[in-house]
Image (tube, grey):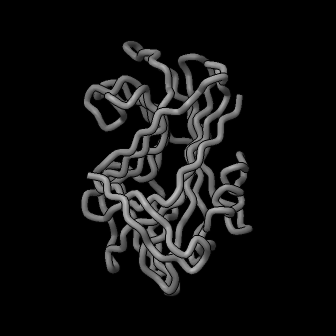
C-alpha cells in the first residue's frame, strides 16, 4: 500500500514529506465548483524522484499521469469509467540509469498519450520526448519536475502533452518555489532556469463504445513494484 514518509533535503524545507507509490495509484477528486464543465486545460505536475536501483535500469515500467472519473474505478481498474492522460515510459519501456556525475537519474524516450475505458486503451505518439527523473541517491538529495497537460477539445475529445525537466538540470534539486514556477508555464516550462522537454500534442477522439463520464479526479499510477516513485508535491493548474 502507499507509504507516507519523510526525507532530508539541503534546500528548504530541510525535511520534506513524500508519498511513495510502488505498483500503486493515487487519486484525488478535484473541486470544480464554479468552473465550467468545458474547461480548456488542466495540467498536473509532480515533484518527484525514483528509488535508486544502485546502478541498474528499470524495465517494463510506466508512470500514468492524468484525469479519471471518480475514485472507485480509476486508471488502474479493469472497470475504468474513463481516464485520459500521459504515459511516461510504457509496458515495454526501459528507464536507463544515468550516473549523472554523482547525481544519477533515470531517463526514457518511450511515451504516449492515452485514453482508457474498462480495459480498452487508445494511445498515440506525437513528436519526441526524453523523460528525466532524479533518483534518491547522489551527492545531494534531489526532487525533479514532471507534468501532464490535458486539453479538452470538446466534451468527448481530449489532447494530451507531457513535459519533463532537462537532463542538464537533474543534478539540482527542484525545490518548491521552482516547482510551482515551472508548473505555471504552459508551453515551454523553465525548470531551474533551463527549458524543459515537451512532447507533441496527442489528440484522443473516442471510437465506438467510449463514454462521456466527466473527468474530475487527479490520477497518478506508477507501475514498478520494486523501485518506488516518491512524490513530494502535486500541483494543479486549470485554465477555463
Give the residue at x 36% y 51%: 222
37 or 224: nearer the eye? 37
**Residue drawn at (56%, 44%), measured in percent from left and top?**
44
Q: Is residue 144 above or below residue 104?
A: above
Nearest the camera: 45 or 105? Answer: 45
Q: Nearer the viewer, residue 113 or 67?
A: 67
Query: In this picture, is 5 found above or below 100?
Result: above
Q: Position of residue 5 (x, y in %)?
A: 37, 64
Q: Residue at point 61% right, 68% down?
A: 174
Left or right: where does residue 237 sit relative to residue 97?
right
Q: Position of residue 160 (x, y in %)?
A: 56, 37
User: Viewed as shown, does residue 58 lie left or right of 67?
Assistant: left
Q: Which quarter of the picture shows residue 168?
A: bottom right
Q: Extreme top residue here? A: 208
Q: Is residue 60 visible?
A: no
Q: Report the number of discs.
A: 0
Compared with 180, 173 (above or below) is below
Q: Is residue 35 above or below residue 3?
A: above
- Residue drawn 66% across and 24% down? 35
Please tell me in which quadrant of the rendered image residue 210 appears.
Answer: top left
* Residue 191 x %, y %: 67, 63
Quadrant of the image containing the C terminus: top right
In screen coordinates, is 210 left or right of 126? left
Question: Is residue 95 visible from the viewing direction of this image?
Answer: yes
Where is residue 226? Give x, y as percent: 25, 63
Amino acid at each position: 500500500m502507499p507509504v507516507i514518509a519523510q526525507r532530508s533535503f539541503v534546500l528548504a524545507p530541510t525535511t520534506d514529506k513524500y508519498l511513495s507509490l510502488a505498483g500503486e495509484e493515487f487519486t484525488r477528486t478535484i473541486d470544480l465548483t464554479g468552473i465550467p464543465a468545458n474547461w480548456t486545460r488542466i495540467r498536473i505536475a509532480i515533484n518527484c524522484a525514483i528509488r535508486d536501483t544502485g546502478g541498474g535500469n528499470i524495465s517494463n515500467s510506466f508512470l500514468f499521469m492524468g484525469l479519471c472519473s471518480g475514485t472507485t474505478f480509476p486508471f488502474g481498474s479493469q472497470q475504468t469509467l474513463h481516464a485520459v492522460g500521459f504515459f511516461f515510459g510504457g509496458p515495454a519501456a526501459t528507464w536507463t540509469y544515468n550516473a549523472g556525475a554523482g547525481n544519477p537519474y533515470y531517463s526514457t524516450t518511450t511515451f504516449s498519450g492515452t485514453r482508457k475505458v474498462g480495459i480498452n486503451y487508445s494511445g498515440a505518439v506525437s513528436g519526441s520526448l526524453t523523460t528525466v527523473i532524479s533518483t534518491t541517491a547522489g551527492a545531494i538529495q534531489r526532487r525533479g519536475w514532471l507534468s501532464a497537460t490535458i486539453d479538452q477539445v470538446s466534451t468527448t475529445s481530449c489532447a494530451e502533452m507531457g513535459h519533463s525537466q532537462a537532463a542538464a538540470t537533474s543534478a539540482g534539486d527542484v525545490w518548491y518555489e521552482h516547482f510551482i514556477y515551472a508548473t505555471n508555464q504552459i508551453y515551454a516550462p523553465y525548470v531551474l532556469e533551463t527549458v524543459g522537454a515537451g512532447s507533441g500534442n496527442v489528440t484522443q477522439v473516442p471510437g465506438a463504445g467510449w463514454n462521456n463520464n466527466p473527468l474530475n479526479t487527479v490520477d497518478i499510477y506508477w507501475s514498478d513494484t520494486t523501485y518506488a516513485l516518491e512524490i513530494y508535491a502535486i500541483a494543479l493548474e486549470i485554465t477555463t
